Image (cartoon, rainbow, N blue to C red):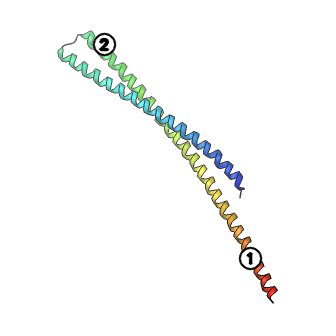
Amino acid sequence: MANLSALETLIELATKETEEAAKRLGLAVKAAADTESKLMLLQDYRAEYAARFQASMATGLSAMGCRNFQLFMDKLDTAVASQQNVVNEARKRVEERRTAWQAGERKRMSYGTLVTRAQQDERRRDDKRDQKAMDEHAARQHLFKR
């Protein structure tokens, strides 16, 4: 088993790595939330514009005006689809960052388990050594009493 100080160094490194991964995850979550917010704004604007289009159609709209509305709606649809792709990519990055953070956390915890085992092994060795010393002492005492 590796010595305790080497394991503690590994734990420190893994902890720093995990903290950095957590920061990257936090930034990715924030970026994903921002992209989702922009998507919702675009969708709301599109719905509002479609409602205005319907109202204009009810009051009468020229062919040119109708065509302009349609062209703008197409542009809005393209913008919404494009933003949806950005949202999907942001969500993908969040999952990648989450996976990296979880892997770092598992690594850190496994080092912690190794440290615990090493400490338990050392304690057992110390206990054995102490028991052996006490047994030898008791045997000597027994010999001296004779």
Instruction: Check disc 2 and report its element: helix, strand or loop.
Output: helix
Looking at the rendered image, the quarter that the N terminus falls into is bottom right
Of residues 82 and 4, which is closer to you in this image?
4
Figure check: 64 above or below 40:
above
Q: Residue at x 37, y 19 (%)?
A: 75
- In the rendered image, the residue lying farthest to the bottom is 146
- Lateral position of residue 26 relative to residue 143, left or right: left
Distance between the alpha carbons at the discs numbered 1 and 2: 98 Å
Of residues 116 and 143, which is closer to you in this image?
143
- Lateral position of residue 32 relative to residue 70, left or right: right
Query: For the residue marked with disc 1, what is the amino acid?
Result: Met
- Lateral position of residue 8 relative to residue 34, left or right: right
Q: Residue at x 69, y 70 (%)?
A: 127
Place of residue 81 in the rendered image (x, y in percent of width and height, measured from the top left): 40, 26
User: Which one is in front in this view, the residue at disc 1 or the one at disc 2?
Assistant: 1
Point out the tag, 1 or 2, that comes first from the N-terminus: 2
Q: Residue at x 28, y 23 (%)?
A: 48
Q: Tag on residue 101?
A: none
- Residue 2's quadrant in the figure? bottom right
The residue that mark 2 highlights is: 68
Query: For the residue marked with disc 2, what is the amino acid?
Result: Asn
Place of residue 130 in the rendered image (x, y in percent of width and height, measured from the top left): 73, 72
Place of residue 78 in the rendered image (x, y in percent of width and height, measured from the top left): 39, 22
Place of residue 66 in the rendered image (x, y in percent of width and height, measured from the top left): 26, 14
Looking at the rendered image, the quarter that the C terminus falls into is bottom right
Instruction: Check disc 1 and report its element: helix, strand or loop.
Output: helix
- In the rendered image, the residue lying farthest to the left is 59
Figure check: 16 above or below 123:
above
The residue that mark 1 highlights is: 134
Tell me if mark 1 has few (under 14), some (14-19) or many (20+) residues whose alpha carbon lies within 10 angstroms of its own: few
